[in-house]
Image: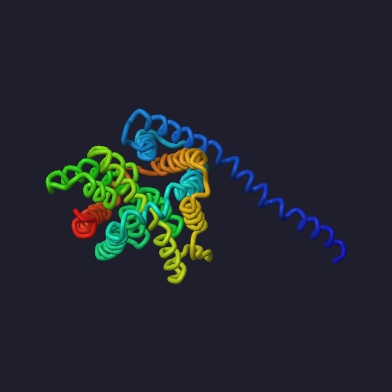
Amino acid sequence: MTQNQPVQAATTSQAPKRPLASSLRGMKAGIPGVIVCLVGALASFVGAQFLPGVSALLIAIILGAVWRNIASVPAILKPGITFSSKKLLRTGIILLGFQLSLSTIADLGFGVIFLIVAAVAITFFATLWVGQLMGIGLAQRLLIASGFSICGAAAVAATEGTTKAAEEEVATAIGLVVLFGTLMIPTVPFLGGLLGMEDEPLGMWIGASTHEVAQVVAAGGAVSASALAVAVTVKLARVITLAPIIAGIAVYMRRSGRAVGDKKPPIVPLFVVGFVAAMLLRTLDFIPAGVLDVVEIIQVLLLAAAMFALGLGVHLRSLFKVGFKPVLLGLVSTVVILVVSYVGVVFFAGS
């Protein structure tokens, strides 16, 4: 017994070093992939400067998807790609909160705020319900519902961290967001013209219905400067709903015991807390404008890196293999948010 004690002590003293060494090895393994994603983000950011109305995030998704579908992704990059699609994304979402001021949202008026909440809530729950009738799994339904009702790929990725969805389900949801959101860029302004809508109400409709912030910018900019300003403000108000919806999903997954393994998702994910804190700091006007400008650039680069990483997971051949049901659900979800938001604009926004 006595002879074994020094051996046990030595083993015990060495044990804490192993997780640290393993963690350092993991960080080192992720460096190449993170660098590639950041380079993709930088290229997207520069490209956006030469393409008015097109966001770096949209360019990043497309670049990543093009790479994934015309060439293989080296295995050495995969740890860093995973890190970028999760950690960099969540950091970017936190920084996104610094762009949102509750006072600006309040200035929209009760009617527009009601329109936003109704459009998000009805689309989210209608998508879940229709998806259930179609026999689509819960994780896939939640990913599509959040992406189509809130803010596109960023919402999909945020939901993935709570639902523990499979990689192909995340890729499918992102692919559908890119597909239908891109189709909405010319469609919503065209429909607005047919319906005789003025620029500001049309901007509200674009902001309340179009999936990605980048797609909102492209569609609003195609109408007029005033439509663009209203569209972006309404869209950013939709982004605020990301916090309560992700928190609600986490609570549901926790209480229903649907988490993978023994680890249950937190009641409120840490990045959601950070997002809300950043939004409150912006609302209280504590941060100088110059600092906010720098934070916005960092936020765009981080989200673009995450979108590039997510784009690398969009394999069109795999998307076609999932069958028509998720595609049909994406179409239904798009039609629902278009109709609900249009009715809201007509009755609550003074159109």
Q: Is residue 235 above or below residue 118?
A: above
Q: Nearer the viewer, residue 171 or 92?
A: 92
Left or right placement of residue 179 versus residue 24 in this view? left
Q: Nearer the viewer, residue 290 or 7?
A: 290
Q: Position of residue 147 (x, y in %)?
A: 34, 53
Left or right placement of residue 100 versus residue 198 in this view? right
**Would you identify the image quadrant in which residue 138 lies?**
bottom left
Q: Which image quarter holds the N terminus?
A: bottom right
Q: Is residue 136 above or below residue 293?
A: below
Q: Position of residue 178 (x, y in %)?
A: 31, 44
Q: Position of residue 14 (x, y in %)?
A: 75, 53
Q: Is residue 229 visible?
A: yes
Q: Nearer the viewer, residue 194 or 264?
A: 194
Q: Residue furthest bottom?
A: 255
Q: Is residue 319 visible?
A: no
Q: How many numbered callouts?
A: 0
Left or right placement of residue 154 versus residue 24 in this view? left
Q: Is residue 27 above or below residue 130?
A: above
Q: Position of residue 3 (x, y in %)?
A: 86, 61
Residue at image position (19%, 53%) is 351
Q: Residue furthest right?
A: 2
Residue at image position (36%, 43%) is 314
Type of colouring:
rainbow
Q: Nearer the viewer, residue 151 or 237?
A: 237
Left or right placement of residue 283 versus residue 190 in this view? right
Q: Residue furthest top?
A: 50
